[in-house]
């Protein structure tokens, strides 16, 4: 069973994505800041991380992305970044820092899950 960790400071957004992923058979967890997220990455060992670029308390999902990409966590973790800000401003930095894709918000949760599941086939 695949595991997804959703990291966003919007709790309702996390709950919505957790619900959609759960209905597709994924185990889910969520975090609202990077320190919470890093502990879950080590303990939960997700296959996929959905990570918002701008986190309210930390303001930098990019730094967490770089940490995920650079540290050996024992398994390859796919990272999908999300942003409600300027997509074009962040695209290259996200991809160069190790993300598989950047998805602009708002988006359809079902379409989003369909899109990221393709990373595993």
Image (tube, helix red, strand yellow):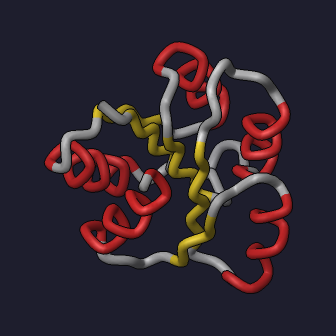
Q: Considering only vertical position in the picture, is 38 above or below 59? A: above
Q: Considering only vertical position in the picture, is 67 above or below 115? A: above
Q: Is residue 44 toward the left or the right of residue 72 in the image?
A: left
User: Residue 80: percent from the left, percent from the top?
Assistant: 57, 57
Quick one: 74 or 121, which is closer to the camera?
Answer: 121
Q: Which quarter of the image is occupied by the N terminus?
A: top left
Q: Residue furthest top?
A: 43
Which quarter of the figure has residue 114?
Answer: bottom left
Which quarter of the figure has residue 85?
Answer: bottom right
Which quarter of the figure has residue 73?
Answer: top right
Q: Residue at x 49, y 36 (%)?
A: 47
User: Residue 44: percent from the left, percent from the top?
Assistant: 46, 20
Q: Residue at x 26, y 49 (%)?
A: 21
User: Residue 99: percent from the left, percent from the top?
Assistant: 69, 56
Quick one: 11 or 117, which is closer to the camera?
Answer: 117
Q: Which quarter of the image is occupied by the C terminus?
A: bottom left
Q: Residue at x 69, y 83 (%)?
A: 86
Q: Considering only vertical position in the picture, is 35 above or below 5? A: above
User: Residue 78: percent from the left, percent from the top?
Assistant: 59, 46
Q: Is residue 58 toward the left or the right of residue 71 in the image?
A: left
């Amino acid at each position: 069973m695949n595991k997804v960790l959703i990291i966003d400071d919007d709790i309702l957004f996390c709950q919505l994505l957790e619900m959609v992923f759960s209905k597709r058979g994924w185990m889910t967890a969520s975090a609202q800041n990077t320190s919470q997220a890093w502990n879950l990455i080590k303990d939960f060992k997700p296959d996929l991380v959905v990570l918002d670029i701008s986190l309210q308390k930390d303001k930098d999902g990019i730094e967490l992305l770089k940490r995920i990409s650079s540290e050996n966590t024992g398994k390859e973790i796919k990272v999908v970044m999300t942003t409600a800000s300027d997509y074009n401003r962040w695209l290259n930095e996200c991809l160069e820092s190790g993300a598989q894709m950047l998805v602009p918000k708002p988006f359809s949760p079902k379409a989003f899950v369909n899109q990221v599941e393709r990373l595993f086939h």
